[in-house]
Image (cartoon, rainbow, N blue to C red):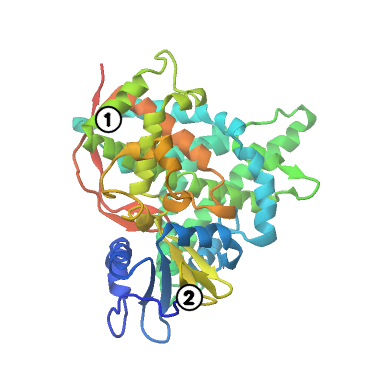
Protein backbone atom coordinates (compact mmCIF):
# COMPACT_ATOMS: atom_id res chain seq x y z
CA UNK A 1 0.00 0.00 0.00
CA UNK A 2 1.41 3.37 -1.04
CA UNK A 3 2.10 6.00 1.60
CA UNK A 4 -0.48 8.74 2.02
CA UNK A 5 1.08 12.01 0.86
CA UNK A 6 -1.75 14.31 1.95
CA UNK A 7 -1.35 14.58 5.71
CA UNK A 8 -4.47 15.83 7.50
CA UNK A 9 -4.56 18.67 9.97
CA UNK A 10 -6.51 21.70 11.22
CA UNK A 11 -6.85 24.59 8.80
CA UNK A 12 -6.39 27.30 11.39
CA UNK A 13 -6.64 30.98 10.51
CA UNK A 14 -5.97 32.13 6.90
CA UNK A 15 -2.95 34.27 7.82
CA UNK A 16 -1.62 32.71 11.02
CA UNK A 17 -2.66 29.06 10.79
CA UNK A 18 -2.65 27.50 14.27
CA UNK A 19 -0.15 29.99 15.71
CA UNK A 20 -2.53 31.64 18.18
CA UNK A 21 -3.94 28.35 19.40
CA UNK A 22 -0.43 26.95 19.90
CA UNK A 23 0.57 30.03 21.86
CA UNK A 24 -2.51 29.83 24.08
CA UNK A 25 -2.35 26.11 24.87
CA UNK A 26 -0.11 23.96 22.70
CA UNK A 27 -0.71 20.82 24.77
CA UNK A 28 -4.46 20.99 24.17
CA UNK A 29 -3.89 21.72 20.46
CA UNK A 30 -1.86 18.53 20.11
CA UNK A 31 -4.46 16.44 21.95
CA UNK A 32 -7.23 17.85 19.77
CA UNK A 33 -5.20 17.28 16.62
CA UNK A 34 -4.93 13.55 17.31
CA UNK A 35 -8.58 13.28 18.26
CA UNK A 36 -9.81 15.11 15.15
CA UNK A 37 -7.28 14.07 12.51
CA UNK A 38 -5.55 10.81 13.49
CA UNK A 39 -2.07 9.60 14.31
CA UNK A 40 -0.08 11.70 11.82
CA UNK A 41 -1.09 15.36 11.66
CA UNK A 42 0.22 18.45 9.89
CA UNK A 43 0.08 21.77 11.76
CA UNK A 44 1.06 25.14 10.30
CA UNK A 45 1.78 28.30 12.27
CA UNK A 46 2.76 31.82 11.28
CA UNK A 47 2.24 34.10 8.28
CA UNK A 48 2.90 32.97 4.70
CA UNK A 49 6.55 33.13 3.77
CA UNK A 50 7.82 32.38 7.26
CA UNK A 51 5.29 29.75 8.23
CA UNK A 52 6.39 26.83 10.39
CA UNK A 53 5.01 23.43 9.45
CA UNK A 54 5.01 20.70 12.12
CA UNK A 55 4.46 17.03 11.38
CA UNK A 56 3.13 15.44 14.57
CA UNK A 57 3.28 11.67 15.10
CA UNK A 58 1.17 10.17 17.89
CA UNK A 59 1.06 6.38 17.45
CA UNK A 60 3.47 4.10 19.31
CA UNK A 61 4.56 2.56 16.00
CA UNK A 62 5.31 5.96 14.51
CA UNK A 63 7.25 7.03 17.60
CA UNK A 64 9.36 3.88 17.38
CA UNK A 65 10.16 4.58 13.74
CA UNK A 66 11.34 8.12 14.47
CA UNK A 67 13.27 7.53 17.71
CA UNK A 68 14.61 4.03 17.06
CA UNK A 69 14.27 2.12 13.81
CA UNK A 70 14.79 5.18 11.56
CA UNK A 71 16.64 7.33 14.08
CA UNK A 72 19.50 8.16 11.70
CA UNK A 73 17.02 9.94 9.44
CA UNK A 74 15.55 12.09 12.23
CA UNK A 75 18.16 14.37 13.72
CA UNK A 76 18.41 17.15 16.31
CA UNK A 77 18.83 19.70 13.54
CA UNK A 78 15.74 21.76 14.22
CA UNK A 79 15.48 25.35 15.38
CA UNK A 80 14.77 24.49 19.01
CA UNK A 81 17.97 22.45 19.43
CA UNK A 82 20.01 25.13 17.69
CA UNK A 83 18.71 27.73 20.14
CA UNK A 84 19.47 25.37 23.02
CA UNK A 85 23.02 24.83 21.73
CA UNK A 86 23.63 28.56 21.62
CA UNK A 87 22.41 29.03 25.19
CA UNK A 88 23.60 25.84 26.92
CA UNK A 89 26.48 24.55 24.84
CA UNK A 90 27.13 21.40 22.86
CA UNK A 91 26.78 18.81 25.60
CA UNK A 92 25.28 15.35 25.50
CA UNK A 93 21.73 16.67 25.06
CA UNK A 94 22.46 18.66 21.89
CA UNK A 95 25.61 17.11 20.34
CA UNK A 96 25.36 14.95 17.23
CA UNK A 97 27.35 12.44 15.19
CA UNK A 98 31.00 11.95 16.23
CA UNK A 99 30.76 14.55 19.02
CA UNK A 100 27.79 12.77 20.56
CA UNK A 101 29.29 9.29 20.23
CA UNK A 102 32.56 10.41 21.84
CA UNK A 103 30.80 12.16 24.71
CA UNK A 104 28.50 9.22 25.29
CA UNK A 105 31.42 6.76 25.45
CA UNK A 106 33.28 8.96 27.94
CA UNK A 107 30.28 9.61 30.16
CA UNK A 108 28.42 6.28 30.08
CA UNK A 109 30.58 4.67 32.84
CA UNK A 110 29.44 7.44 35.21
CA UNK A 111 25.82 6.32 34.83
CA UNK A 112 26.04 2.58 35.34
CA UNK A 113 23.76 1.20 38.03
CA UNK A 114 26.69 0.57 40.36
CA UNK A 115 27.95 4.15 40.03
CA UNK A 116 24.50 5.75 40.25
CA UNK A 117 23.76 3.82 43.44
CA UNK A 118 26.59 5.77 45.10
CA UNK A 119 24.63 9.00 44.54
CA UNK A 120 21.81 7.82 46.83
CA UNK A 121 23.37 9.38 49.93
CA UNK A 122 23.15 12.84 48.38
CA UNK A 123 19.50 12.20 47.47
CA UNK A 124 18.44 11.23 50.98
CA UNK A 125 20.53 13.98 52.57
CA UNK A 126 18.64 16.64 50.62
CA UNK A 127 15.30 14.85 51.09
CA UNK A 128 15.86 14.86 54.86
CA UNK A 129 16.57 18.58 54.64
CA UNK A 130 13.21 19.06 52.94
CA UNK A 131 11.48 17.02 55.67
CA UNK A 132 12.91 19.40 58.27
CA UNK A 133 12.01 22.53 56.28
CA UNK A 134 8.38 21.45 55.99
CA UNK A 135 8.01 21.38 59.76
CA UNK A 136 8.00 25.19 59.64
CA UNK A 137 5.60 25.54 56.68
CA UNK A 138 2.94 28.22 57.28
CA UNK A 139 -0.40 26.49 57.97
CA UNK A 140 1.32 23.29 56.89
CA UNK A 141 0.94 24.24 53.21
CA UNK A 142 3.75 23.86 50.67
CA UNK A 143 3.86 24.36 46.91
CA UNK A 144 5.29 21.05 45.76
CA UNK A 145 6.35 22.50 42.40
CA UNK A 146 8.64 25.03 44.10
CA UNK A 147 9.73 22.57 46.78
CA UNK A 148 10.66 19.77 44.40
CA UNK A 149 12.46 22.23 42.13
CA UNK A 150 14.58 23.24 45.12
CA UNK A 151 15.13 19.64 46.21
CA UNK A 152 16.11 18.41 42.75
CA UNK A 153 18.42 21.36 42.08
CA UNK A 154 20.19 20.95 45.41
CA UNK A 155 20.49 17.19 44.88
CA UNK A 156 22.01 17.35 41.41
CA UNK A 157 24.28 20.23 42.47
CA UNK A 158 25.51 18.22 45.44
CA UNK A 159 26.17 15.19 43.23
CA UNK A 160 27.96 17.36 40.67
CA UNK A 161 29.90 19.70 42.90
CA UNK A 162 30.11 18.04 46.29
CA UNK A 163 31.04 20.65 48.90
CA UNK A 164 30.52 23.49 46.40
CA UNK A 165 26.75 22.96 46.25
CA UNK A 166 25.82 26.26 47.90
CA UNK A 167 27.91 28.25 45.41
CA UNK A 168 25.88 26.96 42.48
CA UNK A 169 22.30 26.63 43.64
CA UNK A 170 21.24 30.27 43.96
CA UNK A 171 22.86 31.35 40.70
CA UNK A 172 21.24 28.54 38.73
CA UNK A 173 17.88 28.94 40.45
CA UNK A 174 17.77 32.66 39.65
CA UNK A 175 19.08 32.56 36.09
CA UNK A 176 18.19 29.31 34.38
CA UNK A 177 14.43 30.04 34.14
CA UNK A 178 15.33 33.14 32.11
CA UNK A 179 17.40 31.03 29.71
CA UNK A 180 14.68 28.37 29.50
CA UNK A 181 11.95 30.86 28.60
CA UNK A 182 14.18 32.54 26.00
CA UNK A 183 15.16 29.28 24.30
CA UNK A 184 11.56 28.05 24.23
CA UNK A 185 10.19 31.27 22.75
CA UNK A 186 12.86 31.49 20.05
CA UNK A 187 12.84 27.75 19.41
CA UNK A 188 9.22 27.76 18.30
CA UNK A 189 8.96 31.23 16.74
CA UNK A 190 8.83 31.48 12.91
CA UNK A 191 10.94 34.67 13.02
CA UNK A 192 13.62 35.74 15.50
CA UNK A 193 15.77 38.86 15.65
CA UNK A 194 19.52 38.16 15.80
CA UNK A 195 20.84 37.50 19.28
CA UNK A 196 23.37 40.30 18.75
CA UNK A 197 20.69 43.00 18.61
CA UNK A 198 20.60 45.05 21.85
CA UNK A 199 17.01 44.09 22.71
CA UNK A 200 15.97 43.77 26.38
CA UNK A 201 15.12 40.08 25.91
CA UNK A 202 18.51 39.36 24.33
CA UNK A 203 20.34 41.23 27.07
CA UNK A 204 18.48 39.47 29.86
CA UNK A 205 19.10 36.03 28.36
CA UNK A 206 22.77 36.78 27.65
CA UNK A 207 23.32 37.99 31.22
CA UNK A 208 21.59 34.89 32.62
CA UNK A 209 23.65 32.55 30.44
CA UNK A 210 26.86 34.30 31.44
CA UNK A 211 25.98 33.96 35.12
CA UNK A 212 25.32 30.22 34.82
CA UNK A 213 28.45 29.67 32.73
CA UNK A 214 30.54 31.71 35.17
CA UNK A 215 29.63 29.72 38.26
CA UNK A 216 30.34 26.43 36.46
CA UNK A 217 33.64 27.75 35.06
CA UNK A 218 34.74 29.02 38.46
CA UNK A 219 34.04 25.76 40.27
CA UNK A 220 35.76 23.76 37.51
CA UNK A 221 38.82 26.06 37.55
CA UNK A 222 39.09 25.99 41.34
CA UNK A 223 38.81 22.21 41.38
CA UNK A 224 41.52 21.81 38.73
CA UNK A 225 43.80 24.31 40.48
CA UNK A 226 43.42 22.45 43.78
CA UNK A 227 44.21 19.13 42.10
CA UNK A 228 47.29 20.62 40.40
CA UNK A 229 48.54 22.09 43.69
CA UNK A 230 48.00 18.84 45.56
CA UNK A 231 49.77 16.90 42.81
CA UNK A 232 50.46 13.28 43.62
CA UNK A 233 49.14 13.79 47.15
CA UNK A 234 45.69 14.72 45.81
CA UNK A 235 42.79 12.65 47.02
CA UNK A 236 40.49 12.06 44.09
CA UNK A 237 36.97 13.32 44.68
CA UNK A 238 33.95 11.16 44.05
CA UNK A 239 31.50 13.90 43.02
CA UNK A 240 30.35 13.84 39.40
CA UNK A 241 32.50 16.81 38.39
CA UNK A 242 35.63 15.00 39.58
CA UNK A 243 34.58 11.86 37.74
CA UNK A 244 33.90 13.85 34.57
CA UNK A 245 37.28 15.55 34.87
CA UNK A 246 39.02 12.17 35.06
CA UNK A 247 36.98 10.53 32.28
CA UNK A 248 39.31 9.53 29.44
CA UNK A 249 40.16 6.75 27.04
CA UNK A 250 42.86 6.06 24.47
CA UNK A 251 40.27 6.43 21.69
CA UNK A 252 38.42 9.52 22.92
CA UNK A 253 40.90 11.44 25.05
CA UNK A 254 39.29 13.53 27.79
CA UNK A 255 36.95 16.50 28.13
CA UNK A 256 38.52 19.95 27.91
CA UNK A 257 37.28 22.82 30.09
CA UNK A 258 34.59 23.97 27.65
CA UNK A 259 33.31 20.43 27.08
CA UNK A 260 33.29 19.80 30.81
CA UNK A 261 31.21 22.91 31.40
CA UNK A 262 28.76 21.91 28.66
CA UNK A 263 28.25 18.50 30.29
CA UNK A 264 27.74 20.11 33.69
CA UNK A 265 25.04 22.35 32.21
CA UNK A 266 23.32 19.36 30.60
CA UNK A 267 23.23 17.50 33.91
CA UNK A 268 21.96 20.58 35.75
CA UNK A 269 19.12 20.90 33.24
CA UNK A 270 18.28 17.25 32.60
CA UNK A 271 18.92 16.14 36.17
CA UNK A 272 17.05 19.00 37.77
CA UNK A 273 13.93 20.23 35.95
CA UNK A 274 12.80 16.85 34.67
CA UNK A 275 13.14 15.05 38.00
CA UNK A 276 11.58 17.97 39.86
CA UNK A 277 8.52 17.77 37.59
CA UNK A 278 8.09 14.04 38.20
CA UNK A 279 8.43 14.32 41.99
CA UNK A 280 6.12 17.34 42.26
CA UNK A 281 3.28 15.76 40.33
CA UNK A 282 3.72 12.41 42.07
CA UNK A 283 3.18 14.16 45.41
CA UNK A 284 0.24 16.14 44.03
CA UNK A 285 -1.42 13.03 42.59
CA UNK A 286 -0.97 11.13 45.85
CA UNK A 287 -2.43 14.08 47.73
CA UNK A 288 -5.50 13.87 45.47
CA UNK A 289 -5.84 10.08 45.71
CA UNK A 290 -5.96 8.94 49.36
CA UNK A 291 -6.11 5.21 48.62
CA UNK A 292 -2.97 5.35 46.50
CA UNK A 293 -1.30 7.48 49.16
CA UNK A 294 -2.21 4.91 51.82
CA UNK A 295 -0.57 2.12 49.81
CA UNK A 296 2.54 4.26 49.26
CA UNK A 297 2.71 5.05 53.00
CA UNK A 298 2.44 1.39 53.93
CA UNK A 299 5.24 0.48 51.55
CA UNK A 300 7.54 3.29 52.73
CA UNK A 301 6.83 2.36 56.35
CA UNK A 302 8.15 -1.16 55.78
CA UNK A 303 11.64 0.20 55.19
CA UNK A 304 14.02 0.14 58.18
CA UNK A 305 13.16 3.10 60.40
CA UNK A 306 16.64 3.57 61.86
CA UNK A 307 18.23 4.84 58.64
CA UNK A 308 17.51 6.81 55.49
CA UNK A 309 16.30 4.93 52.38
CA UNK A 310 19.19 3.66 50.25
CA UNK A 311 19.72 2.33 46.73
CA UNK A 312 19.39 -1.20 48.11
CA UNK A 313 15.80 -0.36 49.07
CA UNK A 314 14.66 0.42 45.54
CA UNK A 315 13.44 -3.14 44.93
CA UNK A 316 11.38 -2.89 48.14
CA UNK A 317 9.36 0.02 46.72
CA UNK A 318 7.52 -1.45 43.70
CA UNK A 319 4.26 0.42 44.30
CA UNK A 320 5.98 3.77 44.70
CA UNK A 321 7.89 3.01 41.49
CA UNK A 322 4.55 2.40 39.76
CA UNK A 323 3.24 5.68 41.16
CA UNK A 324 6.20 7.47 39.62
CA UNK A 325 5.79 5.76 36.25
CA UNK A 326 2.09 6.62 36.15
CA UNK A 327 2.98 10.19 37.07
CA UNK A 328 5.40 10.34 34.16
CA UNK A 329 2.67 9.00 31.89
CA UNK A 330 0.26 11.77 32.85
CA UNK A 331 2.87 14.50 33.32
CA UNK A 332 5.88 13.63 31.14
CA UNK A 333 8.68 16.07 31.94
CA UNK A 334 9.54 16.28 28.23
CA UNK A 335 6.03 16.51 26.73
CA UNK A 336 7.27 17.28 23.19
CA UNK A 337 10.33 15.82 21.43
CA UNK A 338 11.47 17.35 18.15
CA UNK A 339 13.48 16.07 15.22
CA UNK A 340 14.13 17.09 11.59
CA UNK A 341 14.02 14.57 8.74
CA UNK A 342 17.02 14.20 6.44
CA UNK A 343 15.25 12.31 3.67
CA UNK A 344 11.59 11.65 2.94
CA UNK A 345 10.29 8.72 4.99
CA UNK A 346 7.12 6.71 5.34
CA UNK A 347 5.93 6.94 8.94
CA UNK A 348 2.85 5.05 10.05
CA UNK A 349 1.52 5.00 6.49
CA UNK A 350 2.17 8.69 5.74
CA UNK A 351 4.98 10.26 3.71
CA UNK A 352 7.00 12.75 5.77
CA UNK A 353 8.98 15.01 3.38
CA UNK A 354 12.72 15.63 3.56
CA UNK A 355 13.67 18.57 5.78
CA UNK A 356 10.43 18.38 7.77
CA UNK A 357 10.13 19.37 11.41
CA UNK A 358 8.73 16.29 13.16
CA UNK A 359 7.32 16.07 16.68
CA UNK A 360 6.66 12.99 18.78
CA UNK A 361 4.66 13.81 21.87
CA UNK A 362 4.65 11.79 25.08
CA UNK A 363 1.89 14.16 26.25
CA UNK A 364 -0.42 12.75 23.56
CA UNK A 365 0.80 9.17 23.08
CA UNK A 366 0.62 8.63 26.86
CA UNK A 367 -3.09 9.46 26.60
CA UNK A 368 -3.83 7.57 23.38
CA UNK A 369 -7.10 5.65 23.89
CA UNK A 370 -5.86 2.79 21.70
CA UNK A 371 -2.99 2.27 24.15
CA UNK A 372 -4.48 3.22 27.51
CA UNK A 373 -7.88 2.38 28.92
CA UNK A 374 -9.54 5.44 30.52
CA UNK A 375 -6.32 7.38 29.85
CA UNK A 376 -6.98 10.40 32.07
CA UNK A 377 -7.43 8.28 35.20
CA UNK A 378 -4.55 7.95 37.68
CA UNK A 379 -3.86 4.22 38.09
CA UNK A 380 -0.36 3.15 39.18
CA UNK A 381 -1.26 -0.50 38.64
CA UNK A 382 -1.02 0.08 34.89
CA UNK A 383 2.68 -0.50 35.55
CA UNK A 384 2.66 -3.96 37.09
CA UNK A 385 5.28 -6.11 35.31
CA UNK A 386 2.59 -8.12 33.53
CA UNK A 387 0.77 -5.07 32.17
CA UNK A 388 4.01 -3.37 31.14
CA UNK A 389 5.09 -6.47 29.21
CA UNK A 390 1.80 -6.53 27.31
CA UNK A 391 2.11 -2.98 25.95
CA UNK A 392 3.94 -1.57 22.96
CA UNK A 393 7.47 -0.50 23.88
CA UNK A 394 6.73 3.08 22.80
CA UNK A 395 3.35 3.47 24.45
CA UNK A 396 5.36 5.08 27.31
CA UNK A 397 8.58 6.94 26.58
CA UNK A 398 9.22 9.72 29.12
CA UNK A 399 12.99 9.26 28.65
CA UNK A 400 12.85 9.23 24.85
CA UNK A 401 14.13 6.09 23.17
CA UNK A 402 16.47 4.57 20.65
CA UNK A 403 20.14 5.61 20.45
CA UNK A 404 19.39 9.03 22.01
CA UNK A 405 17.52 7.71 25.06
CA UNK A 406 18.30 9.65 28.23
CA UNK A 407 21.56 8.48 29.80
CA UNK A 408 20.29 9.42 33.27
CA UNK A 409 16.99 7.55 33.40
CA UNK A 410 18.07 5.14 36.14
CA UNK A 411 19.43 8.04 38.17
CA UNK A 412 16.14 9.94 37.76
CA UNK A 413 14.13 6.93 38.94
CA UNK A 414 16.47 6.30 41.88
CA UNK A 415 16.38 9.92 43.01
CA UNK A 416 12.62 10.27 42.66
CA UNK A 417 11.63 7.03 44.38
CA UNK A 418 14.03 7.44 47.31
CA UNK A 419 13.15 11.10 47.86
CA UNK A 420 9.42 10.35 47.74
CA UNK A 421 9.85 7.49 50.20
CA UNK A 422 11.68 9.78 52.63
CA UNK A 423 8.95 12.44 52.40
CA UNK A 424 6.09 9.96 52.69
CA UNK A 425 7.55 8.35 55.80
CA UNK A 426 7.24 11.73 57.50
CA UNK A 427 4.07 13.32 56.12
CA UNK A 428 0.45 12.80 55.16
CA UNK A 429 -0.60 14.84 52.13
CA UNK A 430 -3.84 16.66 51.32
CA UNK A 431 -4.32 18.59 48.09
CA UNK A 432 -5.15 22.29 48.34
CA UNK A 433 -5.07 22.94 44.58
CA UNK A 434 -6.88 20.24 42.64
CA UNK A 435 -5.84 21.46 39.17
CA UNK A 436 -2.48 22.87 38.09
CA UNK A 437 -2.19 24.99 34.91
CA UNK A 438 0.54 23.78 32.57
CA UNK A 439 2.56 24.84 29.56
CA UNK A 440 5.27 23.24 27.45
CA UNK A 441 8.73 24.82 27.67
CA UNK A 442 12.05 23.02 27.50
CA UNK A 443 10.29 20.83 30.03
CA UNK A 444 6.69 20.64 31.24
CA UNK A 445 6.08 23.78 33.29
CA UNK A 446 3.46 24.50 35.95
CA UNK A 447 2.20 28.07 35.47
CA UNK A 448 0.46 28.11 38.84
CA UNK A 449 1.00 26.56 42.27
CA UNK A 450 0.43 22.93 43.25
CA UNK A 451 -0.21 23.44 46.95
CA UNK A 452 -0.38 20.53 49.34
CA UNK A 453 -1.09 20.53 53.07
CA UNK A 454 1.46 18.37 54.86
CA UNK A 455 0.80 16.85 58.29
CA UNK A 456 3.55 15.18 60.30
CA UNK A 457 2.90 11.49 60.80
CA UNK A 458 3.21 9.94 64.22
Q: Quadrant of residue 97?
A: bottom right
Residue 293, numbered circle: 1
Q: Is residue 69 left or right of residue 325?
A: right
Q: Is residue 323 left or right of residue 155?
A: left
Q: Nearer the viewer, mark 2 or mark 1?
A: 2
Quick one: 63 or 297, which is closer to the camera?
A: 63
Query: Where residue 6 sits in the image (x, y, percent)?
Result: 41, 80
Query: Where residue 44 sits in the image (x, y, percent)?
Result: 37, 77
- Relative to 421, residue 406 above or below: below
Q: CA distance from mark 2 to mark 1?
A: 48 Å
Q: Quadrant of the C terminus?
A: top left
Query: Where residue 171 sits in the image (x, y, percent)?
Result: 46, 47
Residue 235 visible? The answer is yes
Disc 2, SS: loop
**Residue at image location 54% in from the left, 66% down from the top:** 82
Q: Quadrant of residue 342?
A: bottom right
Q: Residues within 10 Å of mark 1 (few under 14, many from 20)?
A: many
Q: Is residue 343 left or right of residue 34?
A: right
Disc 1, SS: helix
Quick one: 257 or 101, which is closer to the camera?
A: 101
Amino acid sequence: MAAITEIPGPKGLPLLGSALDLRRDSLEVFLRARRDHGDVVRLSAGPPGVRSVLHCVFSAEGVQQILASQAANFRKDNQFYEELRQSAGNGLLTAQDADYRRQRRLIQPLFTKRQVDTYATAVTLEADGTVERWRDAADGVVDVVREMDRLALRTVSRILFGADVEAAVDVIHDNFPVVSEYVTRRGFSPMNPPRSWPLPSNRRAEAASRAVYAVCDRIIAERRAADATAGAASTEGDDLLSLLSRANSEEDGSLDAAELRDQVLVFLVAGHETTATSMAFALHLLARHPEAQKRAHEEADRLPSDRAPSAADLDELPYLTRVLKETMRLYPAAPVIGRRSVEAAEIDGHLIPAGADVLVLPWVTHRHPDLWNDPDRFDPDRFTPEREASRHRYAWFPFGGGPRACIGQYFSMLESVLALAALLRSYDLEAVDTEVPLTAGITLQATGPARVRVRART
